[in-house]
């Protein structure tokens, strides 16, 4: 199916909620591409602790990768988006870069899937807040509504979460204008 323009679907939520796995599986299921989380690549290559300025670099890198994918593909699944960097900045540093705030107002996604924290937290050296999951989830719930309005929470584990996401995306895609 071909849409009038590239459709972007964002997968967002707190750390350790299965965003990367879900984005990759959904892209495969729908024959689309996915934009991996730029922060993971960037932080893996960093030979020091990250700082406030690094988050701006990460945000710009994520948006560049997303824009590049959208220029060449009709359907793009985005593993994280700018709301992740906004919440990360504010939670860690008590402030956020103006560029992120301005760009967040401009970015539009066909639909935003908010991954619930009902998956068990898994250790990863890049994850920082196993004890703050509920607090972060409430931030994501309120801010996805504030910035996007078209967010849908997905819950469950394994195949149940995937099936719920597929069902919601399929319904969304059926209502999109297409071209021949």
Image: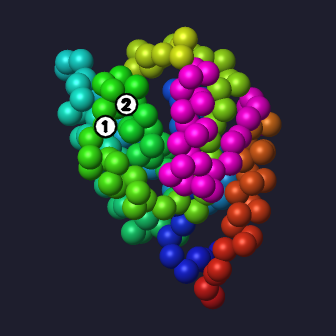
Picture quadrant where residue 51 is located: top left
- The reply to whether callout 2 and callout 1 are in contact (CB within 8 Å) is yes
The residue located at (38%, 38%) in the rendering is 85
Q: Residues within 10 Å of mark 1 (few under 14, many from 20)?
A: many
Quadrant assignment for the C terminus: bottom right
Looking at the picture, does residue 177 appear above or below residue 141?
below
**Residue 29: image location, x then y, percent:** 67, 53
Name the disc covering residue 96, or none: 1
Query: Relative to the observer, which residue lies in front, 176 or 141?
Result: 141
* Main SS, magenta residues: helix
**Residue 44 shows in the view:** no
Give left or right: position of 180 versus 82: right
* Residue on which the image places disc 2: 90
Query: Relative to the observer, which residue lies in front, 10 or 21?
Result: 10
Picture quadrant where residue 2 is located: bottom right
Looking at the picture, does residue 173 appear above or below residue 105?
below
Q: Quick one: SS at disc 2?
A: helix
**Residue 149: image location, x then y, percent:** 60, 55
The residue located at (54%, 26%) in the rendering is 136
Q: Earlier in the sequence, mark 2 or mark 1?
A: 2
Name, please, the residue furthest toward the bottom.
180
The residue located at (60%, 30%) in the rendering is 138
Q: Which residues are magenta?
A: 133-159
Q: Is residue 37 magenta?
A: no
């Amino acid at each position: 199916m071909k849409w009038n323009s590239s459709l972007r679907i964002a997968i967002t939520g707190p750390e350790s909620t299965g965003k990367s796995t879900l984005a990759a599986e959904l892209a495969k299921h729908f024959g689309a591409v996915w934009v991996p989380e730029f922060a993971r690549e960037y932080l893996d290559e960093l030979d020091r602790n990250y700082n406030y300025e690094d988050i701006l670099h990460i945000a710009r890198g994520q948006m560049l990768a997303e824009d590049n994918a959208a220029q060449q593909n009709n359907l793009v699944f985005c593993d994280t988006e700018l709301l992740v960097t906004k919440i990360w900045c504010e939670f860690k540093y008590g402030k956020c870069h103006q560029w992120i705030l301005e760009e967040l107002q401009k970015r539009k996604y066909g639909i935003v899937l908010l991954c619930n924290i009902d998956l068990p937290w898994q250790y990863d050296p890049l994850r920082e807040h196993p004890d703050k999951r509920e607090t972060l989830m409430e931030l994501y719930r309120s801010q996805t509504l504030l910035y996007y309005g078209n967010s849908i929470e997905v819950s469950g584990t394994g195949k149940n979460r995937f099936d719920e996401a597929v069902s919601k995306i399929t319904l969304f895609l059926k209502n999109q204008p297409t071209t021949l």
